[in-house]
Image (cartoon, rainbow, N blue to C red):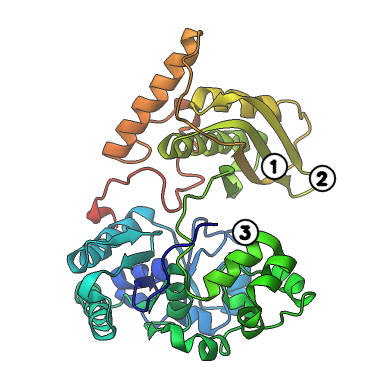
């Protein structure tokens, strides 16, 4: 592993918007302020809360709770259907603020941003003043949106420092303060450490973040192999987390609303999920060599099957393979959930031209449809066969480039 240069204080600023989707809803709907709010793509009982307001969090509601679970915990919670274009609109305004303060901005997700500090900005006071200025300018155009900021030597340390004080915090973590800072954290406060890894670490004598930090390089390499070496340097502030992640799969899933809980309805939604998956593959420059489909029912066994094929990413081919999977199953009780996953991905660097004209035509049609949807909004051009399912499996963040029309918000 080639290490980057020795870590330095005040190298990276990480910004995380607090309860972002829910806060945006409270921003544009002032009557929701002070009220517990959850945002869900589907507001029925089996929908999933993808964002929860601070008020709801205090009542025990968590991101990932089903809507019915959230209502049990907080009887007066307001469930809002997700509006991706609205959140993208505010995302772009936040990005404008950041770009006005630094030329070294990276957008990590819809609500997370990174600034690589350079030159005179790599000082305690300059970095702190930049963070305070950004927080103030965000508040100027959206008074109800808050963010937590962490400043440290690496992406990893700036992220965990920023998340240590929520909501609306600002934490500057110096390398000399790492030992005392780690005493305040639990292992699962570290990104990448889940329950399973926590148990594995315990068997190796690592029961706290301080234990993790104090193990030497030889011990970490011998007991945890290569990941142990990575963690050794990561915990010491080396910025080793910026590398291209090789995607192995991508896909979409959806909990079916009541009107689509039939075989025909589920297949319409499946078609839209495949369409979205194909778009992501083409956008990110990948070809898929396999496709997996899963259908869960309210009763009976689930369908879980897959198919391997020659590398492709055009919608027509992906649809053909997905339907060849489900067509084998004749017994369909009441479906409640469906997902599609493209796997064995490969970079689309030197795609061969097919000798079959219909395949090349399908590739070109997919490319042109993507261009139109990116320019005029996701869903401008769709297959007529899933018109009824157009509003089902709503876009999370983000699919295509939404067309912003504030009057519709």
Question: How many C-alpha atoms fall within 10 Å of the one at disc 3: few (<14), some, or many (≥20)?
Answer: some
Marker disc for residue 300: 2
Indicate whether 229 appears above or below 254: below
- 112 and 259: which one is in front? 112
Reading the chain from its start, which is encountered first: label 3 or label 2?
Answer: 3
Quarter residue 23 falls in: bottom left
Reading the chain from its start, which is encountered first: label 1 or label 2?
Answer: 1
Residue 309, given in percent of the width and then of the height, sits at 64, 24
Quarter residue 325 falls in: top right
- C-alpha distance separating marks 1 and 2: 11 Å
Residue 231, given in percent of the width and then of the height, sits at 59, 69
User: Residue at label 3?
Assistant: 46
For the point 21% across and 79% down, the residue is 133
Question: How many C-alpha atoms fall within 10 Å of the one at disc 1: few (<14), some, or many (≥20)?
Answer: many
- C-alpha distance separating marks 3 and 2: 18 Å
For the point 68% across and 71% down, the residue is 218
Question: How many C-alpha atoms fall within 10 Å of the one at disc 2: few (<14), some, or many (≥20)?
Answer: few
Reading the chain from its start, which is encountered first: label 1 or label 3?
Answer: 3
Residue 365, given in percent of the width and then of the height, sits at 39, 21
- C-alpha distance separating marks 1 and 3: 15 Å
**Element under disc 1:** strand
| Foreground label between 1 and 2 | 1
User: Residue at label 1?
Assistant: 295
Residue 20 falls left or right of residue 335: left
């Amino acid at each position: 592993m080639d290490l980057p240069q020795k870590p330095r204080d005040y190298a990276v600023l990480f910004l995380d918007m607090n309860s972002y989707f829910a806060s945006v809803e409270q921003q544009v709907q002032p009557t929701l302020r002070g009220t517990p709010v959850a945002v869900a793509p589907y507001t029925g009982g089996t929908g999933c809360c993808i964002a929860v307001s601070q008020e709801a969090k205090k009542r025990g509601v968590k991101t990932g709770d089903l809507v019915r679970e959230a209502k049990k915990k907080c009887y007066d919670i307001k469930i809002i259907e997700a509006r991706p274009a609205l959140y993208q609109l505010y995302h772009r305004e936040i990005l404008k603020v950041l770009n006005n303060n630094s030329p070294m901005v990276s957008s990590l997700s819809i609500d997370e941003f990174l600034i690589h500090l350079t030159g005179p900005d790599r000082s305690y006071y300059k970095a702190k003043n930049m963070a305070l200025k950004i927080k103030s300018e965000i508040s100027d155009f959206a008074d109800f949106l808050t963010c937590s900021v962490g400043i440290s030597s690496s992406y990893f340390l700036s992220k965990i420092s920023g998340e240590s004080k929520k909501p609306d915090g600002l934490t500057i973590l110096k390398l000399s303060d790492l030992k005392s800072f780690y005493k305040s954290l639990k292992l699962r406060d570290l990104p990448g450490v889940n329950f399973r890894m926590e148990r594995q670490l315990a068997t190796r004598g690592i029961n706290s973040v301080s234990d993790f930090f104090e193990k030497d390089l030889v011990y970490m390499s011998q007991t945890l192999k290569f990941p142990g070496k990575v963690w050794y340097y990561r915990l010491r502030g080396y910025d080793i987390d910026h590398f291209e992640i090789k995607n192995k799969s991508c896909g979409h899933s959806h909990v079916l609303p009541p009107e689509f809980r039939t075989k025909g309805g589920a297949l319409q939604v499946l078609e839209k999920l495949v369409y979205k998956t194909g778009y992501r593959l083409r956008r990110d420059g990948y070809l898929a060599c396999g496709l997996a489909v899963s259908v869960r029912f309210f009763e009976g066994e689930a369908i879980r099957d897959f198919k391997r094929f020659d590398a492709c990413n055009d919608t027509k081919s992906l649809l053909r393979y997905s339907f060849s999977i489900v067509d084998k199953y004749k017994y369909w009780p009441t479906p409640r959930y469906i997902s599609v996953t493209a796997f064995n991905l490969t970079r689309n660097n030197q795609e061969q031209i097919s000798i079959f004209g219909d395949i090349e035509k399908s590739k070109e049609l997919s490319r042109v449809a993507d261009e139109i949807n990116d320019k005029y909004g996701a869903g401008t051009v769709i297959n007529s066969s899933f018109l009824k399912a157009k509003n089902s499996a709503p876009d999370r963040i983000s699919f295509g480039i939404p067309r912003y029309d504030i009057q519709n918000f």
